[in-house]
Image: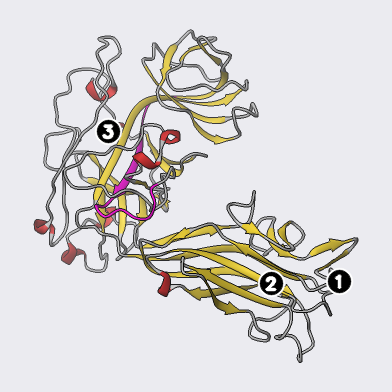
Amino acid sequence: LDSLAADANSYGVSFLRADKNLPLSDKIPDEIVPLNDTDMIVLWQQTNSGQDKTWLAYKNVKERVFFSDDMEGDANGWTATGLWHKTGHFYQPESPDHSWYYGRKIFWDWDYDTGTRNSGSLTSPDINLCSAAGAVLYFWSWYETEANPLYVNSFDLKYVDIDDGTGWKNVCQLLWPKHPMNQWEEISIDLSSYIGKTIKIRFRFDTIDAAFNNHEGWYIDDVRISGNVDFPVNEATLLVRLKEAVSISFQSNSTTPVVNGDRVVGQTSGVRATVDGEPMITSGSWAGGDASGIITLVKTTGAFETGEIIFAAGSAASADVNGYSERDNFIRVYYSDPSGCGTPNDNPFDEQRHGNLRGEANWPPDLNPEWSADTDYFTQVQWDGYNKNVASIELLDTIDEPNAIICSSENELLTPSTGSFSQPELGLHTFGESSTGIYFDDFALKAQIGSDPVYVPPIQE
C-alpha cells in the first residue's frame, strides 16, 4: 500500500472466483477477474488513488497437470527395457523432435524383427495423485504391427498398465480397428480409481512369437495426466515475496558466474552495487559462457550504462550490460494448506509438500537452489497467464523459475525515493457478497532489516 485511504494504491493477491455475468450479485470488481467462474489465485493492482483496478496474472487452482513429458531431452525418469528407446525418426506432428519407440533400425528399415519373440516395457517415474479429485491419462500413439485381420489382435500386443503399489494392472489394450494403424491418435484413460495414490504408468509391447515382426513398431509421445483438485481454500495460506531492486539485463562474457553477494563495478560508469539474490537466467548457462537474464542489485552508487561491462570484485566474473532499470518490483507468490501432500522434495512447483500448520511461520528459501525436502512447505505459483495489456509488467520465463516471477515497473507502487514515508504498507482485504464470512489469522512478516545508514533497503526508505 502507499496511502492511508481506504481505496489505496496497492498490489493484491487473492483466492478468487467471480461471476462476471452477475456483477451486482458477487460484488467483486470485474477488472480483477481474468477468467469467469474459475477457482484462481490472482495477482492484481489498483492505481490512480485506487480508482483503476486490473488483474496482472492468474493461476488456476482447480485444474492441474499432475505429470507431463513431451519426450524431449533426456529420459526424464522413464525406465526402458527391450527395444524401447528415444528417437527423432518419427514423432507426433505437434511435438518438437522426439518420441519413445519400440523397434530398431537395420540399414534403411525400421522394425522389431530380431528373429525371436521379443518384448519390452517403458515405465514412468512415480506420479503422485494425492491432491487429485479426478485425473485422466492422455498420450499420443502410432503403431504398425501385424496387419492380417486374423492375427492383428492376437500377436504384437500393445498394453497400458498402472501400478499403485499393489501390483501392475492392465487398463488398456490397443486393439484394431478401434485404434487404427499408421496414424497418430491421442488416447485418454480415466484414472479416477487411482486418485489419492502414487502410481506408475507402463507401456508394454509383446510380439508373442517370432513371425511377421518386420513392421515398424510402436511410438509413444506427449504423455500427460491432468484433472481437477479440491483445493482447500479454508485454512489455506497465501505467501507473497516482493523484492524492490535496481536491475540490469545482462549477457555473460565469462564462464565464471556472478553470484549473490558479489560486489560489482561498471567498467565505464564506475558505478558500484551488490548483487541481491542469484541472477535470473532466461537462456544459456554460465558454464557455456552464454548466460543471459536479469541481475537484481542493492547498495548502488549510480546508474549503470547500457553497453558497459561489469566486473565482480575478487572473481573472474564479468558480463555485458544490455539494459538498466532504476527500480522494479519482483513478485513471487506461494500457497499451501495444513494437510500437506505426498512426499516433500526439492521441487518448488509441485503439489508434494509438508502441511503448513496454523500458528507456524514457515518460509520458503530465499534462493530456489536451496529448496529441499526439509523446507518444502509451499508450492510456488507458476502463472497460467498474465495481462499483456498492462505495459508496466512482464512475466519472466527463467530457467530455474519458469513463468513464476512478475516484474512490475508501475511507478505508483514503487517506494518513493525522496522524502519521508510513513504510510502502512501491508493490509488484508476481502471482496464479495459473502466477504463478511471470511476470517484471517496467523499473519507473519519477514523483512530485510538494514543497519547501513547510507544504503537503506528500499522498503525502509
Displayed quadrant of residue 228: bottom left
Q: Residue furthest left?
A: 436
* Percent x, y of residue 27: 17, 60
Q: From which residue to which does the magenta span run?
A: 325-344
* Residue 122 or residue 70, whichever sits in front: 122
Residue at 36 percent of width and 32 percent of height: 366
**Distance between mark 3 and mark 1 Cα atoms:** 74 Å
| N-term mark: 3 or 1 | 1
* Residue 398 or residue 32, whichever sits in front: 398
| N-term mark: 3 or 2 | 2
Amino acid, disc 2: Phe
* Percent x, y of residue 225: 49, 64
Residue at 56 percent of width and 16 percent of height: 308
Which label was assigned to residue 412?
A: 3
Q: Does the magenta stretch include residue 338?
A: yes
Label 3 SS: helix
Which label was assigned to residue 115?
A: 1
| N-term mark: 1 or 2 | 1
Q: Which of marks 3 and 2 is in front?
A: 2
Residue 326 visible in the displayed image = no
- Here the colouring is secondary structure
